[in-house]
Amino acid sequence: MSKLLRKRAIRISVLCAVLCSLVLLTACDRSKKNGSETTPTVTVAPAASGCEVHILDIGKADAIFLRADGVTMLIDAGYPSSADTVIAYLKAQSVSKLDYVIMTHGDIDHVGGMADVLREFAVGQMFISPKKEKSDAYSAMVAAVKEKNISCISPEVGAQYTFGNGSFTVLAPGPKALKEGSDNDASIAIRLVYGERSFLLMGDALSTTEKELIDSSYTIRADVLKTGHHGKSDATNKKFLKAVQPKYAVICCGKTEDGEEGTPSTKVLDLLSDFHVITYRTDLHGTVIFKTDGTTLTCNCDAEQE
């Protein structure tokens, strides 16, 4: 075959291929219009810069999602019935891996949904309270940790970890709280710092832990306070608020898994008001989201977005 014929043959082959592709594309387009194929939803990943703290509305229970410069963290996972809500929320935030998971303590309204969450996402490092619990939910969490071979430790008080361009310090439970306090005083509490802004997240820690923090050498002042123990009167006392000086406070409260009301103490609400703290309640305001670039700090909640 001459060179001229070869060139013509190649051109014809290319032309046929193009025509076939056009036919196939037209057929696909028609099938989509006819409803025989569902167009996939494309989720745009959120911006990787800055820090966000999402305090979820799951009743009288805790689940907090944090992200800073692409690094992610989950603190607690509510009741067993909260698992689907927490998982769906994380997926809506385009989460595929949790770099940190903190299990503050073993109460059912904190550990209940954790086993399901651990099985759903890759996990980098997990922290658990040194005080172990005997419950089905706690045992399920331990089983999930072993099943997925997750690195899991009880962090030392004072230990500091990087979190994107920020960092967090483990402040509790201290030795006095573990020795003299209740199960709630065994809660892991952390202080997250991002630029000039700070967050103090107290789990269910009570007045024994609060006093220990006041008497310690650790910095506990924070722009945002996630109050201990759902706003009950055995936490968030006057001396503690004076030391923390928060601009905002968030109370995780609402119905229990049994449908009972878990409203915060009037004493605590009055005290927060006396200190001119802008207070959000998940039972009234829904999920509360703070965002900061290290200087500015904004807050949005479900109630404001309606």
Image: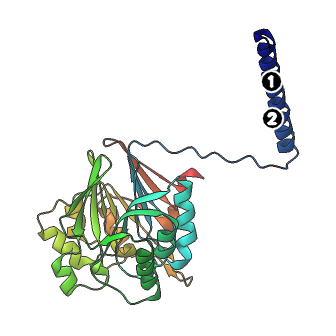
Q: Is residue 60 visible?
A: no
Return the x and y of residue 207 as percentages of the image width and height.
24, 77
Q: Is residue 242 left or right of residue 101?
A: left
Q: Position of residue 15 (x, y in %)?
A: 81, 21
Q: CA distance from mark 2 to mark 1?
A: 18 Å
Whether residue 191 is visible here, answered yes or no, is yes
- Work out whether residue 154 or residue 157 is closer to the camera in this orientation and state it: 154
- 126 vs 262, left or right, is left
Identified at 44% across, 71% down, the residue is: 148
Q: Out of 137 and 61, give the one closest to the viewer.
A: 137
The label number, if any, that marks residue 25 in the structure image: 2
Picture quadrant where residue 87 is located: bottom right
Quadrant where the N terminus is found in the figure: top right
Give the amino acid type for the residue marked by disc 1 in the picture. Ser
Q: Secondary structure at mark 2?
A: helix
Q: Amino acid at mark 2?
A: Leu
Q: Is residue 185 above or below residue 44?
A: below
Residue 284 relative to residue 227: left or right = right
x%, y% of residue 300?
A: 48, 51
Depicted 254 relative to depicted 281: above or below:
below
Front residue of 105/94: it is 94
Which residue is pictured at 43% across the width and 89% down the height?
135
Q: Label 1 belongs to which residue?
A: 13
Q: Nearer the viewer, residue 65 or 94?
A: 94
Q: Give the class, few, some or many, for how many residues have Cα within 10 Å of label 1's Cα (few <14, many ≥20).
A: few
Instruction: Return the x and y of residue 304 as percentages of the image width and height.
Output: 54, 52
Q: Residue at x 33, y 48 (%)?
A: 164
Sequence-first tag of 2 and 1: 1
Secondary structure at badge 1 equals helix
